[in-house]
Amino acid sequence: MSKLNIAELNKIVLESLDFFSNSPVPKLNTKNFSFGFIVGSGNAYNTGQIIFNDQKALYANESNFNNLLKTYHSLIKEKVLKEAVIISASGEKDAIWEIKAAKKAGLKTTLLTCEPDSSGAKIAENVLPFRKIAEPYTYNFSTYFGMIISKSGEHAKDIRKEIDKIDSAVKKVNFKKYRSFAFVLPDKYEAIAGMINIKHEELFGPLMSLRAFSEGQARHAKFVHPSKDELVISFSENKYFGEKNSRLEINLNKNAGPGLILAASYYLIGLIQGSKPPYFKKDIEAYCTKTGAIAYKGKNKFNIIVPGN
């Protein structure tokens, strides 16, 4: 097990909210971007969907971007597609080749990142830097949260007040007694369901079940097997999903934006994390120092605690 003092996700959420309460984010106006590609890996992809959800865009990730550049080559040549926005907290890894590929295809490149001195930042034509705090590798809450509220206009102080209400509401919930967990989110926050599913992969993997769906997705046979051992968490009334006595409805501000939904979800995941064996703490050091970089064909180790800025 790592000897480092690795905080659970809920503690990082609170630290991030306090940080952004004292260091407000700048306003991000996406109307300045031309019709083009929004590119990101993992939760950067979902963040892009949230930030650019009110305008025309094509979304791409590390697996399909090259193919999409070929598919839409004629539209790029005709200047219908003019730009590629690459979102990457680190500005490294896949972001580097994605920027190079976009430039080679004739697209203007913009990088949204928390590392303005990164390899990607050095080659992108435009860089929009964001702030972050120090967090364990893969958590990436402060990184993408800052980007999201820079667009949504939500205030970290207001979100912190809502999280404090949640904390009071769930004190009697015994997360330890449940074998699995599921989130059901309003349809407009489908991208955050994707972010929750990625957190499951990173924090628990095959060791524990944590699922997330939009309400629309949940109707499609996701709860064929209801169980009293699965706690179903929602941010609105849940009439249909999971065993009736194993549902947790969290009442949030009616005007809840994506920043609040993300913070609330990650906060609850952190409470779940703290109630279970320290899976992440046990395995993250070996991943960062031995196995993680191999898939990127690199020799550099990852930081177990990624520095803030």
Image: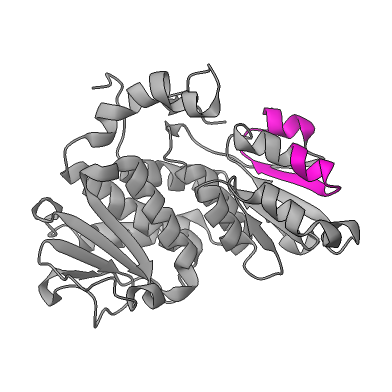
Closer to us: 278 or 70: 70
In the rendered image, the vertical position of residue 163 relative to residue 3, given as above or below: below
Q: Quadrant of the C terminus?
A: top right
Question: Measured from the top left, where is residue 262 in percent x and y?
Answer: 43, 58
Quadrant position of residue 31:
bottom right
Question: Measured from the top left, where is residue 85 in percent x and y?
Answer: 71, 50
User: Does the magenta-highlighted stretch encompass residue 105?
Assistant: yes
* Residue drawn where x is 18% and y is 63% of the image: 231
Question: Measured from the top left, where is residue 216 in percent x and y?
Answer: 40, 77
Quadrant position of residue 254:
bottom left
In the rendered image, the vertical position of residue 294 relative to residue 135, given as above or below: above
Closer to us: 68 or 177: 68
Asked whether the viewer can see residue 170, the reply is yes
What stretch of residues is rendered in magenta?
100-123
Quadrant position of residue 230:
bottom left
Q: Quadrant of the N terminus?
A: top left
Question: Measured from the top left, where is residue 94 in percent x and y?
Answer: 61, 37
**Side (left or right) of 183 relative to 63:** left
